Image (cartoon, helix red, strand yellow):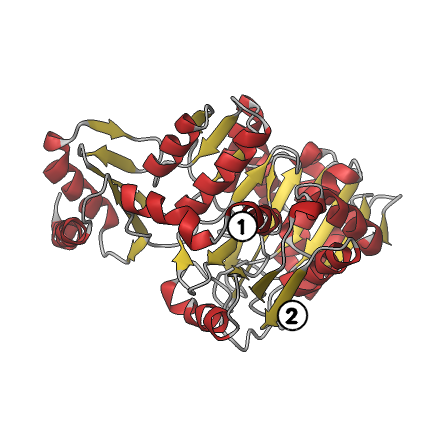
Amino acid sequence: MSLSCFKTYDIRGRLGVDLDEGIAHRIGRGFARALGARRVVLGRDIRASSQSLAAEVARALVDEGCEVLDLGLSGTEEMYFATTHFDADGGICVTASHNPMDYNGMKMVRTGSAPLDAATGLSSIKALAEANDFGPRRNGGALRDVSKEARAAYVSRVLSFVDIAALKPLRIVVNAGNGAAGPTFDAIAESLIAKGAPLTFIRMHHEPDGRFPNGIPNPLLPENRPPTAERVRAESADMGIAWDGDFDRCFFFDHRGDFVDGEYVVGLLAEVFLTREPGARIIHDPRVIWNTRDVVARAGGQAVQARTGHAFVKQAMRDHGAIYGGEMSAHHYFRDFVHCDSGMIPWLVLAELVSRKGALADLVAARRAAFPSSGEINFHLADARAAIASVRAHFEPQAVSVDETDGISLDMGDWRFNLRSSNTEPVVRLNMESKGRDLAPLVAALTRQLQNGQGAE
């Protein structure tokens, strides 16, 4: 049986088509067998199917003789942290993050919270799960609830990134999107207030609800942003925060309710961490790069480019000893958080930055003017390969440089674009940036070339 739910660096698929409880069981046994695991951390998000899928993964791990450390409802980053905290051989979070309602999946790491990709375990797990030749259950397996201990340790680590004494009175809107973020945020907020942080939180869509009554939590989509923006304005808040379903991504709104694009957040966080550790390395993805590279150079750091995707950025963090890494899609990675991404650390760091330096809008205004960006534009194309080839043939002769780290990036001198097929969805993604130039006509021209080039050879 060929399993179509194995993607570039995680598991994802349609329920009843690519993924079900039986497949989850096989993946669980394959994970334990491929990694030689004896202790595995397991978490899950709030989706209706996640509890039964996680239960089947737990049963499979126990059948392989593993001690399963159960986090219950949790964010993916809590699994990352707990895998190292408990010195486990691996970790799994059952989650589909921001995918449609009929999807689910799994994110996985090995010992030390290191990523799994096709070259470091996923292919072995897939082969074992497809063969489904595991034999009888092994002895010694057990399921243990570690949710309270794990969350307490996680909260302590997350709060270590902020100087609570530096925080000023701020009003912050927080939108959990009815995902897994609510309970974890409450634990962080409770500890902050107990330590004297003068923060006021306005919660919205806070209760976890796998039916997602307010829509799938994915603030990267412009159509999902107005509720948070409107609440920020209505409450006269200093900033707003919104998370995706498993809260490994967080998104920001300034005091006017304006969305702050991810690449500018990367620049702000890079500058903060270079202040803390001058000369450090900063990892960035290849989609939108000019603002980040300029900020890092001005702050005396070293910018290093990695392929898009959490597995690639995490490996680059380790390979280069980077203190921080950021993707414009709102994944932020921290060396001192087991080299993994977190959706809770960024807002804490930015709350301290706003307390020290003033409004978020003012902090990004000059950067937006210097390096405008288009935001990510997605295309569903009949022939994506032909369309991308057509764009390349049209623009490459005038390009200053070509970069194929991830998809195709062409530097046109005072503007630049990256065009790539998604690793997780059937779409082509376009990102454009410039050095102070109006992007609207350039976006229109490239869009026409993409759409007209679908029939090209």
Circle 1: is it few (<14), some (14-19), or many (20+) Cα within 10 Å? some
Residue 267, placed above or below residue 45: above
Amino acid of disc 2: Pro
The tag on residue 125 is none
Horizontal side of residue 230 vs 126, given as left or right: left
Find numbered disc 2 in the image and state the secondary structure of the residue it sits on: loop
Residue 20, placed above or below residue 272: below
| Viewer-closest of 182 and 209 | 182
Q: Position of residue 67 (x, y in %)?
A: 83, 45
The residue wearing badge 1 is 354
The residue wearing badge 2 is 208
Residue extending furthest toward the right: 140
Q: Position of residue 189 (x, y in %)?
A: 71, 59
Which quarter shows the C terminus? top left
Identity of the residue drawn at 25% across and 49% down:
384
| Viewer-closest of 373 and 421 | 373
Q: How many marks?
A: 2
Q: Position of residue 178 (x, y in %)?
A: 59, 70
Find numbered disc 1 in the image and state the secondary structure of the residue it sits on: helix
| Viewer-closest of 368 and 313 | 368
